[in-house]
Amino acid sequence: MPCPTLEDLLSGKSGNHAVHCRDCKALLDAYAEVDSVFESAFSGISSPAGLSAAVYAGIFPIGFKLRPSPVPEFLDLIGWTAVLAIAAIVLPRFILPLSSIWAVFG
Ligand SMILES: [Zn+2]
């Protein structure tokens, strides 16, 4: 049976594969060791209070506005042009018979 990926091992999708596989158990142990080292090394570190606002200000400068895409408007134009073209073709075929009917009653 092939070894699952690390993501599957961590999420539990692999079942109890690591219990029976020495390589996967070693991988999970190494992962746990690295995780604990990182937690102990960076546990007292937090980002400065204004970092989030500064990052957002760098991404979206003051006065910057996202312009809406012109694609929907262009698709509207194409759609309404098609509707008008169909109406220009179909309506004269119905208007002529109606005028002949009105001529009978008129
Ligand atoms: Zn394995």
Image (spheres, helix red, strand yellow):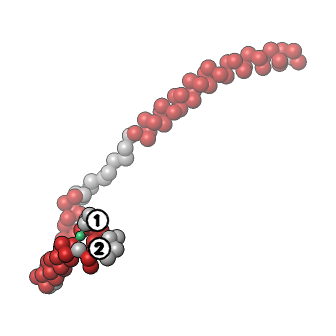
Dot 2, crowdedness within 10 Å: few (<14), some or many (≥20)? some
Q: Which residue is mark 1?
A: 1
User: Which amino acid, mark 1?
Assistant: Met
Q: Image quadrant of residue 21?
A: bottom left
Viewer-closest of 42 and 105: 42
Viewer-closest of 28 and 91: 28
Residue at the spot 38% in from the left edge and 40% down from the top edge:
70
Is 62 on the left-hand or right-hand side of 93? left
Q: Which residue is mark 2?
A: 17
Place of residue 37 in the rendered image (x, y in percent of width and height, measured from the top left): 12, 81
Is residue 35 in sight in this rendering?
no
Whether label 2 lies within 8 Å of ligand 1 gets the answer yes
Viewer-closest of 55 and 32: 32
Q: Which mark is residue 51?
A: none
Residue at the spot 17% in from the left edge and 76% down from the top edge:
26
Does the CB distance between marks 1 and 2 fall below 8 Å? yes
Viewer-closest of 104 and 83: 83
